Amino acid sequence: MCGIVGYIGPERATDILMEGLTRLEYRGYDSAGVAVYENGKIQVIKARGRLDCLRSKLEGQPLYGHVGIGHTRWATHGEPSDENSHPHLSQSGRIAVVHNGIIENYAPLREKLMRKGYEFVSETDTEVFAHLLEDTFSRGNGDILKAVRDTVLKLEGAYALGVLCSRFPDRIIAARKDSPLIVGLGEGCNYIASDIPAVLPYTRRVYLLEEGEMAQVFADHVEIYDMDLQRVDKEVYEVTWSVDAAERGGYAHFMLKEIYDQARAMRDTISPRVKEGRFNLAEAGLTDEMLEKVRRVVITACGTASYAGQVGRSLIEKLCRVPVEIDVASEFRYRDPILSPEDLFIVVSQSGETADTLAALRLAKARGCKVLAITNVVGSTIAREADNVLYTWAGPEIAVASTKAYTTQVLCFMMIALQLALVKGRITQEKYDEYMKEFLTLPDKAEKILEDVTPIQKLAARFFSQEDIFFIGRGLDNALCMEASLKLKEISYIHSEAMPAGELKHGTIALIEPGRLVVAMCTQTATMDKLFSNIREVLTRGAVVLAVGYEDSTREDEATSYRMAIPRTDDLFAPVLAVIPAQLFAYYCAIQRGYDPDKPRNLAKSVTVE
Ligand code: M6R
């Protein structure tokens, strides 16, 4: 999604802005721009396309000023174009604005401004803010902070805003509501950014702006205000992860790095939660006393996070005999869901900023539910608004295609399910200990899968030119198929469908033709016979079957032509291992097809619009 960077200090602003925008590239964008105060006025340069297009323009027209704001835009209102790129100037050119989020009431505001004689050069909602701010400022007492505050109060929707005004070149103004924004604290210089990696080369000390907070960012100090323009005393947040952790570290792509980082991430998710042979989830409010009272669980999320939730549902229902309802957040929030304050309401989100998931969280809270967030990003909006948080501790996930976030989210559900089952007396202490012993081996087993990925590379080289690939499985394998299929389609652009294996014959089998690849997830012993009947159904119709199963199982070899193996584990834990070959298969298919897996078309890392 869009990215914001701002800088004020002794350096040439464009150098810092371009470096910051480069670090935000992973968020996804289709155009970019900068605004710098220079020689008494604001100069704006912007370009459709990758940052290199903007770089070329800046080479031809260098800017030397020391205060500026920059933006990478992912089109929402108006197509990707130079005109629609940010920053946007007000009519007089004295105010420049960058904005993440969506101003929902932009149409009536635009009409009103047009009636007053304001002329628009873009189709964006952001330009409305630029003119509206100028209008408000021109009728005010010359206080730019107050003018920004008065203007944002007229907005409906979400915003993270950076404002530069030529009357006040000693500061950048920032404001946020429902869209993340931070202030980076330097020595004799300061920054704003929509995401921490943008400022990490320069500082680890940041302010995380809260809902409705504003900042006046000067080179030598920062002032934070609330919406009543009262000063806010904020704690500095020290970033503990390294710049290197947010960079590729020698891997060809972030996605590959993150796939390989999974064993480490899994250990970091598990180890702080295991104390004396038991899971201790009290940090997330999941005390034994609380778990005893759980009568129903409701899970909501989007994309990969929702597929982690699907695994969670199967585990909780199977192990705990507690009913679980799950829905994608974009549907959940609009279907007037039946919720009760007694429900354990779980939202799952890597970024902690996904607009639909956040809205579902707010809906649940409004209905009196206590919300538990499973998230990766400390200080994210979802983390801050949830009643309790179970952090995945996966480390920064940069690639658009989620990998280590999924495995660690699934581990969180496994810990919750096992603890809930024990507390509710659904499993004996002996069985719990047995599960725990096996659970603790999962990071090592993940590492083993990653020791030699050549067979998976070869399979991708064999199948990358397929036009459709089907994923089939039963039970937990079915939940896993959805994630495997999404991974493949989002980065390789191969059309793919995930299908409960028994459901194939009710329609989709019509698409099976000679040579079509069907990936069969084969980790669930209880339904294995049934699954093999379904495998035979597609084999009979000429499909090629690639099985994902345990390395010590010979059954797949009898019926299927190709296989990807994982170490043996309890069937309940298999999704966390079996997803890894599926991620690698998707990654290598994308490479074979000549695509950049880190920058899939039309996608953004953090979807902060509905
Ligand atoms: O940050 P979130 O986990 O809330 O994001 C949810 C989805 O947008 C995300 O999982 C998306 O589906 C990924 N592209 C999947 O790889």
Image (spheres, rainbow, N blue to C red):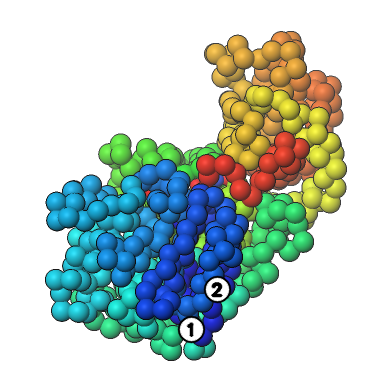
Is 251 in front, or is 446? 251
Relative horizontal placement of residue 560, taking residue 92 as reference (left or right): right
Is 433 in front, or is 286? 286
Whether label 1 lies within 8 Å of ligand 1 gets the answer no
The answer, for residue 340, to whether it is visible in the render is yes
- Look at the numbered disc 1 and give the secondary structure of its residue: loop
Q: Which residue is mark 2?
A: 16
Q: Quadrant of residue 160?
A: bottom left
User: Residue 315 appears at what percent x and percent y?
Assistant: 56, 42
Q: Which residue is mark 1?
A: 9
Residue at 37%, 55% in the rendered image: 101
Residue at 57%, 16% in the rendered image: 508
User: Residue 607 appears at what percent x and percent y?
Assistant: 45, 50
User: Residue 99 appears at what percent x and percent y?
Assistant: 37, 60
Q: Quadrant of residue 384?
A: bottom left
Above or below, 474 against 312 in this view is above
| Residue 340 - label | none
Q: Are marks 2 and 1 in contact (CB under 8 Å)?
A: yes
Is 279 in front, or is 194? 194
Q: Amino acid at mark 2?
A: Ile
**Distance Cα–Cα, label 2 vs label 1:** 10 Å
Above or below, 46 against 316 in this view is below
Relative horizontal placement of residue 224, taking residue 515 as reference (left or right): left
Disc count in the image? 2
Above or below, 195 against 173 in this view is above
Q: Earlier in the sequence, mark 2 or mark 1?
A: 1
